[in-house]
Image: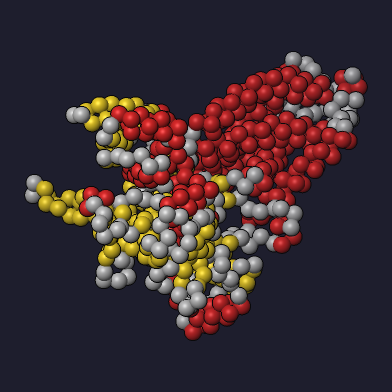
Amino acid sequence: MLNKTPLWKALVIIFVLAVGFIYALPNIYPDDFAIQISGASTSDLVTERQLERTETALSSAGISYKQAVLEGNSITVRFTDNDSQLAAQPVVQRAIGEEYLAALNMVPTTPEWLTNIGATPMKLGLDLRGGVHFLMEVDLAEALKQTMNVNLSDVKSTLRQEKIRYRSVNMTGPSEIQALFRNEDERDEALNLARREFIDFVADDFERDDMYGVSLRLDEARVREIEDYAITQNLSAIRNRINALGVAEPLVQRQGRGRIVIQLPGVQDTALAKRIIGNTANLEFRLEAKPDASASDTETHEFRSEVRDALLEKDIIVTGSSVVNASQSFDENGQPQVNIRLDSLGGKKMLRVTQNAVQRRMAVLYVEHKERTRQIQSEGEVIEKKIRFVEKGIISLATIQSPLGNEFRITGLDSPAEASELALLLRSGALTAPVYFVEERTVGPSLGQQNIEAGTNSILLGFGLVLIFMIFYYRVFGLVANIALAANVFIVIAVMSLLSATLTLPGIAGIVLTVGMAVDANVLIYERIREELRNGLPPQSAIHAGYDRAFVSIFDANITTLIAALILFAVGTGPVKGFAITLSIGIVASMFTAIVVTRAVVNLIYGGRQIKTLSIGGNTKVIDAEEASA
């Protein structure tokens, strides 16, 4: 008999649909507005004491909350609405103190039995959940300058260590260092040393005004390498800082040559996000200048917390970019300090310099790149102009008691909060190059909710109109197609949840398009069945032929669309990727539901028995008993 579904295939269909339903189920549970309390650094443990302070502060302020629990090393406080969450955040922050962070967040309400099997809701993008969007510009020229400054100091110290006398060593261009010597022998010795020790540079010799010189120059490829490295390191550092904020599904990616796009869904405290992400705090370790040092080799810097200054050498030993770990603690006098560990190269440089500088003092210089907006008059109009500048202040000036290596400590910080934040920034990774905020957009949770409602309504409206049309035009077969459509939506949502994909507004558009494409496949099959009926085939044969002969057309159409979706995903960014993801998943799911699932349901209704009519709309086939037996 025709149109019988094998048992194994029926079991596979039931399994896929059941799994799709279960893993789509978490998405019906809305997220709670919440505040998450965590330590400002990994060394700050969250305990029952902070939980008690939080509950007491909320009760005193008359702010109601659903639940406050200590889980692991963080506290989650859930609220019924956004207004209560926003009002509670400053109250909680004051209660727990500066050693802890009270961050706004959204937490799921998925039942435990679902989470135990890995069923979690889809992540919502910025346009649906609300949050902040930053566009940041990386100062590539400053990145190159910082690298050259470090190399300049390294060239000087290497020449001194090898006892090669020089008249001057200076940067003569953005990517060139020139060293001048008194005679040809010293120049040749330095040239050989440069080619051996500074392999990243192209080393050449020259003569000028009875002076013998060595030029160290970076070629264009190496300059581009330094710029790419600066952006890559900044991306890594920013991601680490965002992880410290506890943001779910952040987007951090490069845009163009020197810009970074950051999207933080669910983040509402933009001030905290900007302070942590954009803080370009870095450190420079320098020796205090000797009394007889040349003025051209020294700089005067003020202390950050004291009204005094100190004369420092211009040569930089290492910077915060060499720090691989940093933690906050207290010294024997109870004052805050930061314990530093350098990478191997930084440790070697520190040892090389400090072993010849015992009993001299070394300064830790705190460097910040800042940007301010000022209003100026121009041709009778007031315009805003952004001014970028660098602030440097000494935070520590201590005597070197013995040669330093990979590990040492920084003292002289103002407060435990400052020590904690400095440790966090250094531990996360100092920004290799300064970054500046070019654009900032905030999507409020209410607007995100409106987008969710609009997207949901569009799916329901489109889905409803399709259901009505299919039942009206194809009768029982239309009902079967509608069952497959519902299964298709469940499978798409389930797969996106399993893949932890982020749903955006364009992604919802992809789901709506998928619904139309799934119906299109069924229309092709049903019209083919009606055509076979008109050509005189019995109902069972018409069903069989309709599915088999329509398959090639459906497969070709879906494969070409899938290829287009994959190309969109490969070359697109942001919203385009979101659309491509849902469309790709939807195409594969619609092939399964429109062909396999509908055929199984049709076989369940009509298969394996004699029938005289097919309820398939305008071409219900009526046959006699003799034809039925055939």
Residue extending furthest toward the top: 535
Q: Nearer the viewer, residue 530 or 525?
A: 525
Q: Nearer the viewer, residue 309 or 433?
A: 309
Residue extending furthest toward the bottom: 60
For the rendered model, the colour scheme is secondary structure
Left or right, residue 385 beside residue 471: left
Which of the 4 image quadrants contains residue 68? bottom right
Residue extending furthest toward the left: 380
Residue 228 seen in render:
no
Which of the 4 image quadrants contains residue 545? top right
Q: Which residue occupies 35% across, 29% down? A: 188
Left or right, residue 314 beside residue 524: left
Residue 448 picture location, percent across and down: 47, 54
Residue 174 picture location, percent across and down: 30, 36
Q: Which residue occupies 89% across, 30% down? A: 609
Residue 290 picture location, percent across and down: 30, 58
Left or right, residue 408 beside residue 557: left
Q: Which residue occupies 22% across, 53% down? A: 295
Question: From what the image shows, is residue 98 above or below residue 383?
Answer: below
Question: From what the image shows, is residue 29 above or below residue 416?
Answer: above
Number of numbered discs visible in the structure rendering? 0
Quadrant where the image shows the C terminus: top right
Quadrant where the image shows the N terminus: top right
Residue 215 picture location, percent across and down: 32, 31
Residue 545 seen in render:
yes
Left or right, residue 276 beside residue 292: right
